[in-house]
Amino acid sequence: MFRKPPATGRPANRPTRRAAVAATLLVLGAISGCSTQSSAPTVPPPVEVASFAGLVRLPDGRKIFAECSGTGTPTVVMVPGSRSWHAVWDSVEDPTTGQLTASEASVFGRVATVTRVCAYDRPGTSPADGSPRSTLVTQPTTAQQGADDLQAWLTAAKIPGPYVFVAHSWGGMLTSMYAGSHGEQVSGLVFVDSATPNLQDALTPEQWSTFTGGLAPLVDGSNAEVPDYPASMDAVRAAAEELPTVPTVVITSDQQFAFGAGGVETWPAWVQAQADFAAQHNARHITETHSSHMIPLTQPQLVADAVIEVVAEARG
């Protein structure tokens, strides 16, 4: 079940409500694609939420859970936030009950109608039943470790680049790290209310200390993911200087939330960091989202439309 995060949780929180994700669409096995046929050639064929879902073995023996669907290039790779997993991309939320259900109306499902799309679970994330699928690792983990795992599973799964990366919250730090080091493998970027290397500058020293000081208590022996912002910030800042010149979109929440640097009064600093990041990288900045932090769940069409636009630009 999804567990509701505390009001002062880290950015890139898990999905906000308890919910079950439809497991019938997940098929373990070797990586392969599948397609369906339409009775009328003018009607696009239906797209399964996951035409592949299973464990990918890394060279070091660890396993990463991933799912892929759709056909076409470039492949869109969806990077979740901290303690979040593939369901933030492939599910929709019932606004009344908060229940999450795997759906073709999700960001993942919508993008799969135009190109190949893949999502994955980092170590330390927990799916709906509370049992992590990906091999656990010692926490906390840095953005560099996350970027290395991202590269490892893409290679092990034989998913060819270049990629359009779509990143939420802490996933933005990993994506900046990866993209700054592997620019030739990147054809587009979409940052969805992502943490950025600009965050430290946007916060006061006291707020930054509060933010980073709240991370250590989350290392509780369970190996649930804890992002190591202090050890990552300088490296991500340097990597961001090398981001490739590709179609880029930044999507920012317009409803305040507390992300761990204090109360909701610190939210303007989060927004400012996003604006600075968008300006630095000549990104289209979407600020009218009618959403707090979990934009992929609350506004899946808005996110999908931005991704599909970047895919079209990347195709030229």
Image (cartoon, rainbow, N blue to C red):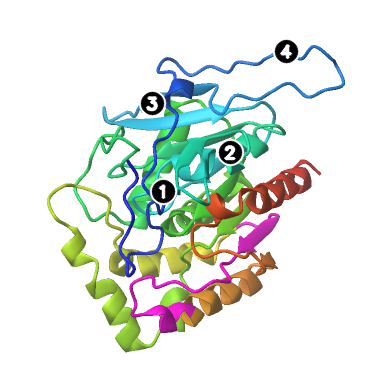
The secondary element bearing badge 1 is classed as helix
Residue pointed to by mark 2: 108
- The x, y position of residue 214, in whole percent, is 24, 71
Residue 281 x, y percent position in the rendering: 64, 67
Main SS of residues in magenta: loop
Q: Residue furthest left?
A: 221
Query: Amino acid under label 1?
Result: Ala
Foreground: disc 1 or disc 3: 3
Foreground residue among 183 and 289? 289
Give x and y (percent) for residue 187: 66, 46
Q: Horizontal and vertical percent for residue 72?
A: 69, 29
Circle 2 packing at 10 Å, graded few (<14), some (14-19), many (20+), is: many
Mark 4 vs mark 1: which is more N-terminal?
4
Q: Nearer the viewer, residue 278 or 81?
A: 81
Task: Identify the mark nearer the N-term, 3 or 2.
Answer: 3
Residue interval drawn in magenta? 244-267
Gap in angstroms between the C-alphas marked 3 and 4: 28 Å
- Dot placed on the residue nearer the N-terminal end, 3 or 4: 4
**Location of residue 12 with respect to 272 vertically, above or below:** above
Marks 3 and 2, Cα distance to the nearest angstrom? 19 Å
- Residue 151 shows up from this direction: no
Residue 37 disc label: 4
Reading the image, the residue beneath label 3 is 56
Of the pair 197 and 256, the residue shown nearer to us: 256
Q: Is residue 66 above or below residue 256?
A: above
Instruction: Say which residue label 1 marks.
Output: 147
Tell me the kind of residue under disc 4.
Gln
Q: Is residue 204 magenta?
A: no
Q: Nearer the viewer, mark 3 or mark 2?
A: 2
Quarter of the image for the N terminus: give it. top left
206 left or right of 290 in image: left
